[in-house]
Image (cartoon, rainbow, N blue to C red):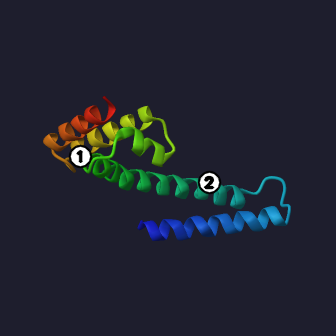
Amino acid sequence: MATEDVLAAYGRHLAVLAVARARQVRGDDPDLAEQALDALEASQAIVDDLWLKRMPIVRDALTFGATVTEVAERMHAPVRKVVDELQGWADVMCAVDAITEAERRRVRRLLIGGVL
């Protein structure tokens, strides 16, 4: 499903849940439970999509001279988390042949250069 479609579905689920809260619906309601579960699933798909799109931008920032500390500050994240996420992204992308082994090693060198 395209990102726009997931965002639209997420918005619809949230709207249904907001109406239920406004109406103070209480008790078991399988349809509303399903709406909430669908909203959670859509939000996770959005997070996953953003994560996949964010890591190449992290790589670009490091490639063009930003430090890992600067990247972490902009992401409001600890340096270790940025390092772990970019390494994990590179490992996964290499495993599915989305980047080459040489590119994966280049990402690791960028991190080593940016951390030390």
Q: Nearer the viewer, residue 51 or 68?
A: 68
Q: Quadrant of the N terminus?
A: bottom left
Residue at (24, 40) in percent of width and height:
107
Residue at (34, 48) in percent of width and height:
58
For residue 109, what is the image quadrant? top left
Residue at (34, 41) in percent of width and height:
67
Mark 1, Cα crowd under 10 Å, few <14 / some 14-19 / many 20+, is few
Give the side of residue 102 with respect to residue 98, left or right: left
Instruction: Please state which amino acid type lies under the numbered disc 1.
Output: Val
Q: Position of residue 21 (x, y in %)?
A: 80, 61
Instruction: Please state which amino acid type lies under the numbered disc 2.
Output: Leu
Residue at (24, 35) in percent of width and height:
108
Q: Nearer the viewer, residue 90 or 1?
A: 90
Give the side of residue 61 with respect to residue 1, left or right: left
Q: In the current view of this chain or complex, which residue is farthest to the top?
A: 116
Mark 2, Cα crowd under 10 Å, few <14 / some 14-19 / many 20+, is few
Mark number, residue 96: 1
Mark number, residue 37: 2
Q: Position of residue 103 (x, y in %)?
A: 18, 44
Q: Position of residue 57 (x, y in %)?
A: 33, 53
Q: Work out whether 110 lies above or below 75.
A: above
Give the side of residue 75 with respect to residue 26, left or right: left
Q: Position of residue 24 (x, y in %)?
A: 86, 61
| Nearer mark to the viewer, of 2 and 1 | 1
Mark number, residue 39: none
Badge 2 element: helix
Marks 2 and 1 sit apart, C-alpha to C-alpha, by 29 Å
Sequence-earlier tag: 2 or 1: 2
Q: Quadrant of the C terminus?
A: top left
For residue 31, what is the image quadrant? bottom right
Give the mark count. 2
Give the side of residue 41 with respect to residue 58, left or right: right
